[in-house]
Image (cartoon, helix red, strand yellow):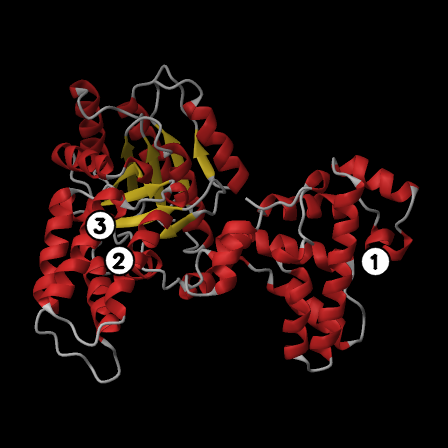
Amino acid sequence: MFDKLTERLAFSLRKISGKARLTEENITETLGEVRVALLEADVALPVVQQFIDSVKFKSLGQVVSASLNPGQAFLKLVKAELVSVMGGVNEHLNLNTQPPAVILMAGLQGVGKTTTAAKLANLLKSSDKKKVLLASADVYRPAAIEQLQSLASQMGVDFFSSNQSQSPAHIAELAMNHAKTNFFDVLIIDTAGRLSIDENMMNEIAGLHEVLDPIETLLVVDAMAGQDAAITARDFADALPLTGVVLTKADSDVRGGAALSVRFITGKPIKFVGTGEKIDALDPFYPERIASRILGMGDILSLIEEAEHKVDKKKAERLAKKFKKGKSFDLEDFRDQLQQMNKLGGVTGMLDKLPMGGNLAQLGKSKVDDAFFSRMEAIICSMTPRERRQPNLISGSRKRRITQGSGTNIQDLNRLLKQHKQMQKMMKKVKSGGIQKMLQGLDGMSPTGGDMGGSGGAPPYR
């Protein structure tokens, strides 16, 4: 996320880090490069101008704390201004109303609005324990209603049936009545994608807003659109009383223009950010954490929170008990660990939240291929339970059967078995109290060691 901006800012700020003191000359020089970095990231010009002016004003004559060098003091100012531009703090959904609390989703065509509505329903159901009803008022896009119904079914969320012969306003009224009579906590209404220049469509959603009187009206915008996303948000804000914005496709956005522009231009907070295609890939937007990631400081807090919510604690406890009893680390355990890691966004997803200064993060993000770990899981799933518990049985015809069943090759399977043996050795070292020994054992599993190769003998490096 925002990799190019992070790289450019790191290069710009590195120049001032070694200075003995902050002066107008070195501050102006550094901010000139920061300005270029922000413009290249497609941040809106008014945002860039205010950002630069504010940092310059606050840094000139800055009294540097004894615990900070001038570079650290300047970086602290830059981070504080980034946080301020993005809104300061996370603004939660306001559901403080007589149930059902209505959330109206709006946005342009193709920004991922329907998927976001489903993700939000899943988040409210799993994290806030809300009884959620999903409904679609998109009667224009083919299969839009069916798409949302399918997503609702996958998540176990209730769906209000509608069809393309009904008007959006009629669907909204019926869904509201159903939500009231069946005691739902939250009603989420998905709407048709529209163009801000389409007056009829904008009038239609304004009419929907009048019928529903939603407590939250969320605009969904594509983070990859850069400052155009902020301009779109401004246009919608002129037609609708928006309460917040959701940024989608942020995991693919290497620039960061939308995240840094939306709040400033619209005055509306970014409430959520979409970080992937999976149904749980929707996170609250925390300006301070995003600023830390932009400046290469990592986001350990979000990683910890993800682990708390997504890691299967029962499996972790079962594995710990197994080790205490002296049992070995088998391939079923290995598969469980791969699945847990995948829930946290894979290796690259986890490394993205580590401080950029860490060699592991830099090495991993450039060289590790998550697809290889998916192949490893497929190979293990193609084994019999006995083979998973006793990998030494796997040879000859068993290898051919396993690789045919998983769509891989013998080289992939051999690498997996080698990785597993190394993991077993590491686990034994941990059990014997040797954390340092375990870290030494990691050397053999590093990407540069060649043990994480891809299909066909080629390394899975990007």
The answer to which image quadrant residue 68 occupies is bottom left
Task: Indicate which disc residue 389 carries.
Answer: 1
* Amino acid beneath label 2: Ser
Q: Is residue 88 above or below residue 254?
A: below
Task: Bin the neighbour count of mark 1 within 10 Å (Cα to Cα): few under 14, some 14-19, many 20 and up.
Answer: some
Q: Secondary structure at mark 3?
A: loop
* Amino acid beneath label 3: Pro
Residue at the farthest bottom position: 66
Q: Is residue 363 above or below residue 66?
A: above
Q: Residue at x 25, y 43 (%)?
A: 40
The image quadrant where one finds the C terminus is top right
* Amino acid beneath label 1: Arg
Residue, disc 2: 12
Q: Secondary structure at mark 2?
A: helix
Q: Residue at x 14, y 32 (%)?
A: 239
Q: Residue at x 31, y 44 (%)?
A: 255
In the picture, measured across the screen, residue 449 lies left or right of residue 115, that is right
In this view, the mark in front (3 or 2): 2
In the picture, measured across the screen, residue 307 lies left or right of residue 41, that is right
Task: Indicate which disc residue 269 carries.
Answer: 3
In this view, the mark in front (1 or 2): 2
